[in-house]
């Protein structure tokens, strides 16, 4: 018999499809420790971030030349960043569509379709002919595949991050919250390493003709492995029981926006500084160095890889710090520090090798400390029956507002008005985070 929950009187999704073969195959008795849930979160997110950064790095190093050869280097890179943003715009749509699929069928079917879509889009990009071969059709197909990736990204939400947050010991919420965030620097580290190796060992012509496609094939292969790993986790009896016990099932999107819209907005804006900085130390510096500096790109990627290692250590530290002083205090303090860091952007990026390296290493450290606690810092505000959908929509909105257009805006501002405007852009993100956290605190006191 299928169980249901209610959200304001409306019937919720069936918790699980009764004939799910994967669930029956993997069912076992026993309890699940939060550490086991964390493994599922890390596996799922690591594959997503690797795929994410493969595309992001290619948006700077490859796509301007192979898909926009008719434009000058700056204009081509800006066009590439516009296509890059399409995934973030499409992601909320993917969440809505795949929440409906889960309601209609099951969590396993939803996840399988989402990751199959992601793998297909990635594979098509790997085989996609260039502009010189098929003209504008190449740009159209690339854009459609990028939209498909965004829809799949929204659909790949499996509820495990929310389950981890609810299952973690009270005094270790910050520690367990940061585990899933480790996937971001790890994904960047692997993606940057692959591109650095290819740049170091291939001629420019070979890299632009066929070398850049190899990381996309790797992303496709990792996506397949991650699919089976995640299905095995979410389809077990214990995970299903925990997900069901915490009412982690889709809620009607219209209902949650109406009743919990302020929590979605505050949750997204609270992490604005982290998400803005996310692309300003990964994607934007690559484009700026490519256009306005003479440093070899493989050398600069190596510096960013060291930065990713620093970010891993900083994320680990964020878990310890958050459990001592509180997750929201940690996020607010780091937003203020990111605001101060923003003032140094022009001098560091224009400061030669030493200045640029300092920007990368300090920026990644601040990113790790803040991003480690950026996921769900205020999602505890959601009613439990709304948390599954609310957490997904909050994440979608945070990426859209904070990160989707960051490379485009930062490069456009720096190219036309100077690096000082990048400082203002990052500073605005820090101010937005502090304002959202203050508003959240005021609403809690009022309630």
Image: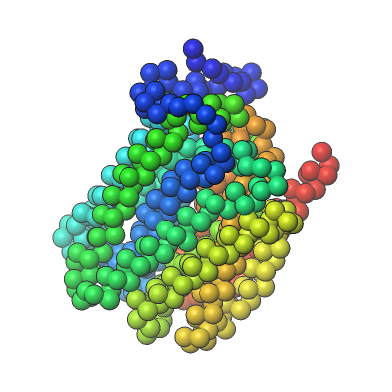
Nearest the camera: 77 or 335? 335
Residue 298 in view in this figure: yes
- Which quarter of the rendering shows the C terminus? top right
Q: Position of residue 332 (x, y in %)?
A: 71, 59
Residue 198, picture quadrant:
bottom left
In front: 51, or 272? 51
**Which residue does the image show at 52% across and 50% down from the upper left?**
180
Check the image and name the residue furthest to the top. Answer: 1
* Colouring scheme applied when the structure was drawn: rainbow
As drawn, the residue found furthest toward the left would be 133
Query: Toward the viewer: 370 or 94?
Result: 370
Q: Residue at x 57, y 83 (%)?
A: 347
**Which residue is painted at 41% across and 39% down in the image?**
230
Farthest residue, direction front: 30
Q: Position of residue 346 (x, y in %)?
A: 56, 80
Query: In the image, is residue 253 above or below residue 302?
Result: above
Residue 239 vertical position relative to residue 73 in the rendered view, above or below = above
Residue 389 appears anywhere in the view: no
- Give the total of numbered labels: 0
The answer to whether 435 appears left or right of 445 in the picture is left
Q: Position of residue 285 (x, y in %)?
A: 46, 73
* Above-or-below relation of 404 to 282: above
At 50% across and 81% down in the image, what residue appears? 356
| x, y percent for residue 410 | 50, 69
Q: Quadrant of residue 11?
A: top right
């Amino acid at each position: 018999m299928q169980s249901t929950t209610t959200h304001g009187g409306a019937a919720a999704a069936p918790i699980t499809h009764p004939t799910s073969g994967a669930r029956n195959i993997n069912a076992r008795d026993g309890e699940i420790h939060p550490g086991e849930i964390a493994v599922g979160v890390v596996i799922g997110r690591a594959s997503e971030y690797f795929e994410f950064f493969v595309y992001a790095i290619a948006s700077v190093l490859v796509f301007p030349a192979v898909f926009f050869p008719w434009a000058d280097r700056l204009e081509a890179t800006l066009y590439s960043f516009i296509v890059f943003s399409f995934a973030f715009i499409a992601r909320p749509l993917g969440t809505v569509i795949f929440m409906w699929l889960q309601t209609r069928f099951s969590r396993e079917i939803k996840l399988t379709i989402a990751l199959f879509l992601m793998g297909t889009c990635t594979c098509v990009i790997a085989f996609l002919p260039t502009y010189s071969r098929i003209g504008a059709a190449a740009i159209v197909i690339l854009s459609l595949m990028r939209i498909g990736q965004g829809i799949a990204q929204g659909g790949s939400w499996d509820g495990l991050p929310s389950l981890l947050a609810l299952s973690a010991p009270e005094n270790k919420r910050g520690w367990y919250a940061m585990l899933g965030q480790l996937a971001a620097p790890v994904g960047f580290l692997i993606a940057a390493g692959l591109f650095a190796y290819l740049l170091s060992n291939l001629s420019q012509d070979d890299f632009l003709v066929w070398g850049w496609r190899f990381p996309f094939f790797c992303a496709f292969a990792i996506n397949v492995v991650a699919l089976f790993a995640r299905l095995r986790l979410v389809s077990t009896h214990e995970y299903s029981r925990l997900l069901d016990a915490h009412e982690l099932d889709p809620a009607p999107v219209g209902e949650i926006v109406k009743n919990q819209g302020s929590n979605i907005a505050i949750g997204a804006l609270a992490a604005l500084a982290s998400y803005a900085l996310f692309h300003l130390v990964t994607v934007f510096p690559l484009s700026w160095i490519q256009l306005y500096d003479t440093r070899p790109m493989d050398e600069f990627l190596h510096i960013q890889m060291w930065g990713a290692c620093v970010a891993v250590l900083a994320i680990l530290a964020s878990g310890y710090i958050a459990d001592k002083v509180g997750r929201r205090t940690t996020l607010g303090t780091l937003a203020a520090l990111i605001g101060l860091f923003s003032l140094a952007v022009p001098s560091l990026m224009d400061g030669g090798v030493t200045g640029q390296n300092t920007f990368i290493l300090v920026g990644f450290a601040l990113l790790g400390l803040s991003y480690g606690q950026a996921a769900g810092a205020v999602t505890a505000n959601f009613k439990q029956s709304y948390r599954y959908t609310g957490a997904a929509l909050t994440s979608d909105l945070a990426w859209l507002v904070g990160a989707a257009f960051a490379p485009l805006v930062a490069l456009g501002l720096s190219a036309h008005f100077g690096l000082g405007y990048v400082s203002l852009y990052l500073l605005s993100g820090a101010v937005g985070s502090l304002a959202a956290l203050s508003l959240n605190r005021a609403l809690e006191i009022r309630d």
